[in-house]
Image (tube, rainbow, N blue to C red):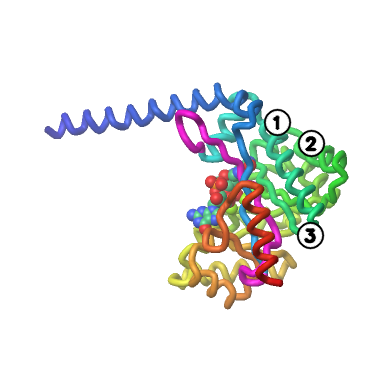
Amino acid sequence: AAKAAGRNRFRAFDEGLLRCLAMRRDCERDLSRALAEGALAVWFQPIFGQAGRNVVGLEALVRWHHPVHGWIPPGDLIAAASAAGLTESLLRFILEQVCTMMLTLRERGLGDVRVAMNVSPREMAQIPVDEIVLGRLRALGLSLPMLEIEITEETALDIEATQGKLSALSQAGIRLALDDFGVGYSALASLRALRADRIKIDRSLVTGLAASDDKRGLVQAVLGLGRALGLDVVAEGVETAEDLATLEALGCRFMQGYHLGRPAPADATLRMMADLRASAA
Ligand code: C2E
Ligand code: MG
Ligand code: MG
Ligand code: MG
């Protein structure tokens, strides 16, 4: 019986693996058409200041609903793009949506709301992200400090492949944020190498911090680090009112998370911002 169970387990694992491989293959095959047909989307999640009372930024998050496999996690999408040789096309597509959002915000007198986009280590290493981003923003007459690029410390530490691009972006006025801060292994070294403008505390340290002395201590330490280095700190993954109140008590000024606002399409995001302004006035 044990043997049979083992065999079944193996088969279940095998089928899962096959599904996964099929999904990967289908994604690589279908991505180029999805890009051309506009089947991909960029959603925006608000970043709040003043303990959740006003929107100071928007983070762009890519979304792909595959006709067979459903929602594809962004990480899998980035990997499929790389395997299909579409890394640059995908980056340009996302950048275009980000620029459209920045133009709309400016039109509505909200030019001080910063828009953040994620760039993976692979994208940063493989393609001329600096030329692409700076070229596009300049062509559209957009203010460079309105854009923030979120990278992880993996990117910051791949000095040879990324240092030149990161300093070109930062010297031109693009803001840099170190994402998922606090889960890596040499976060302090990457902060120095990078000259980041902002730290985003990983949500594994934030979610549930009201009930965890350990998490509270760690978040407090990152906030202190931010103060010492003159960096803004954003807490990601704020899922409850308790966590929000705790962050506020610790002096955290910027927050992002399901409790405050979920990622949503551009039009819904703009409506939400207009409603928030109307109710504040
Ligand atoms: P990230 O940059 O750390 O983005 C935050 C992720 O946390 C998003 O997941 C967001 O939907 C989710 N999130 C936000 N608030 C909460 C919360 O309160 N609770 C929980 N449990 N989750 C929350 P998403 O969109 O699935 O993206 C996952 C990761 O994929 C991102 O992590 C980012 O590293 C990457 N990613 C997303 N979009 C892009 C993109 O356009 N380009 C690149 N290169 N990477 C992207
Ligand atoms: Mg991010
Ligand atoms: Mg993050
Ligand atoms: Mg993350």
The residue shown at (63%, 58%) is: 272
Q: Secondary structure at mark 2?
A: helix
- Residue on which the image places disc 3: 112
Q: Residues within 10 Å of mark 1 (few under 14, many from 20)?
A: some
Magenta-colored stretch includes residue 262: no
Q: Position of residue 79 (x, y in %)?
A: 57, 33
Q: Is mark 2 within 8 Å of ligand 1?
A: no
Mark 2 to mark 1: distance in Å? 9 Å
Q: Residue furthest bottom?
A: 249
The residue carrying mark 1 is 88
User: In whole angstroms, how far apart are the C-alphas of marks 1 and 3?
Assistant: 28 Å
Mark 3 packing: few (<14 Cα in 10 Å), some, or many (20+)? Answer: some
Specify the amino acid type for callout 3: Asp
N-terminal label among 2 and 3: 3
Expressed as whole percent of the image width and height from the top left, the position of residue 86 reads: 65, 27
Residue 225 visible in the shown view:
no
Nearer the viewer's eye, disc 1 or disc 3?
3
For residue 131, above or below residue 54: above
Determine whether 266 is above or below 37 in the image.
below
2 and 1 marks in contact (CB < 8 Å): yes
- At label 2, the amino acid type is Ile
Position of the N terminus by quadrant:
top left
| Among the 4 quarters of the image, the one containing residue 108 | bottom right
Residue farthest along the top direction in this orientation: 29
116 lies left or right of 24:
right
Along the line of sight, which residue is nearer the eye, 217 or 54? 54
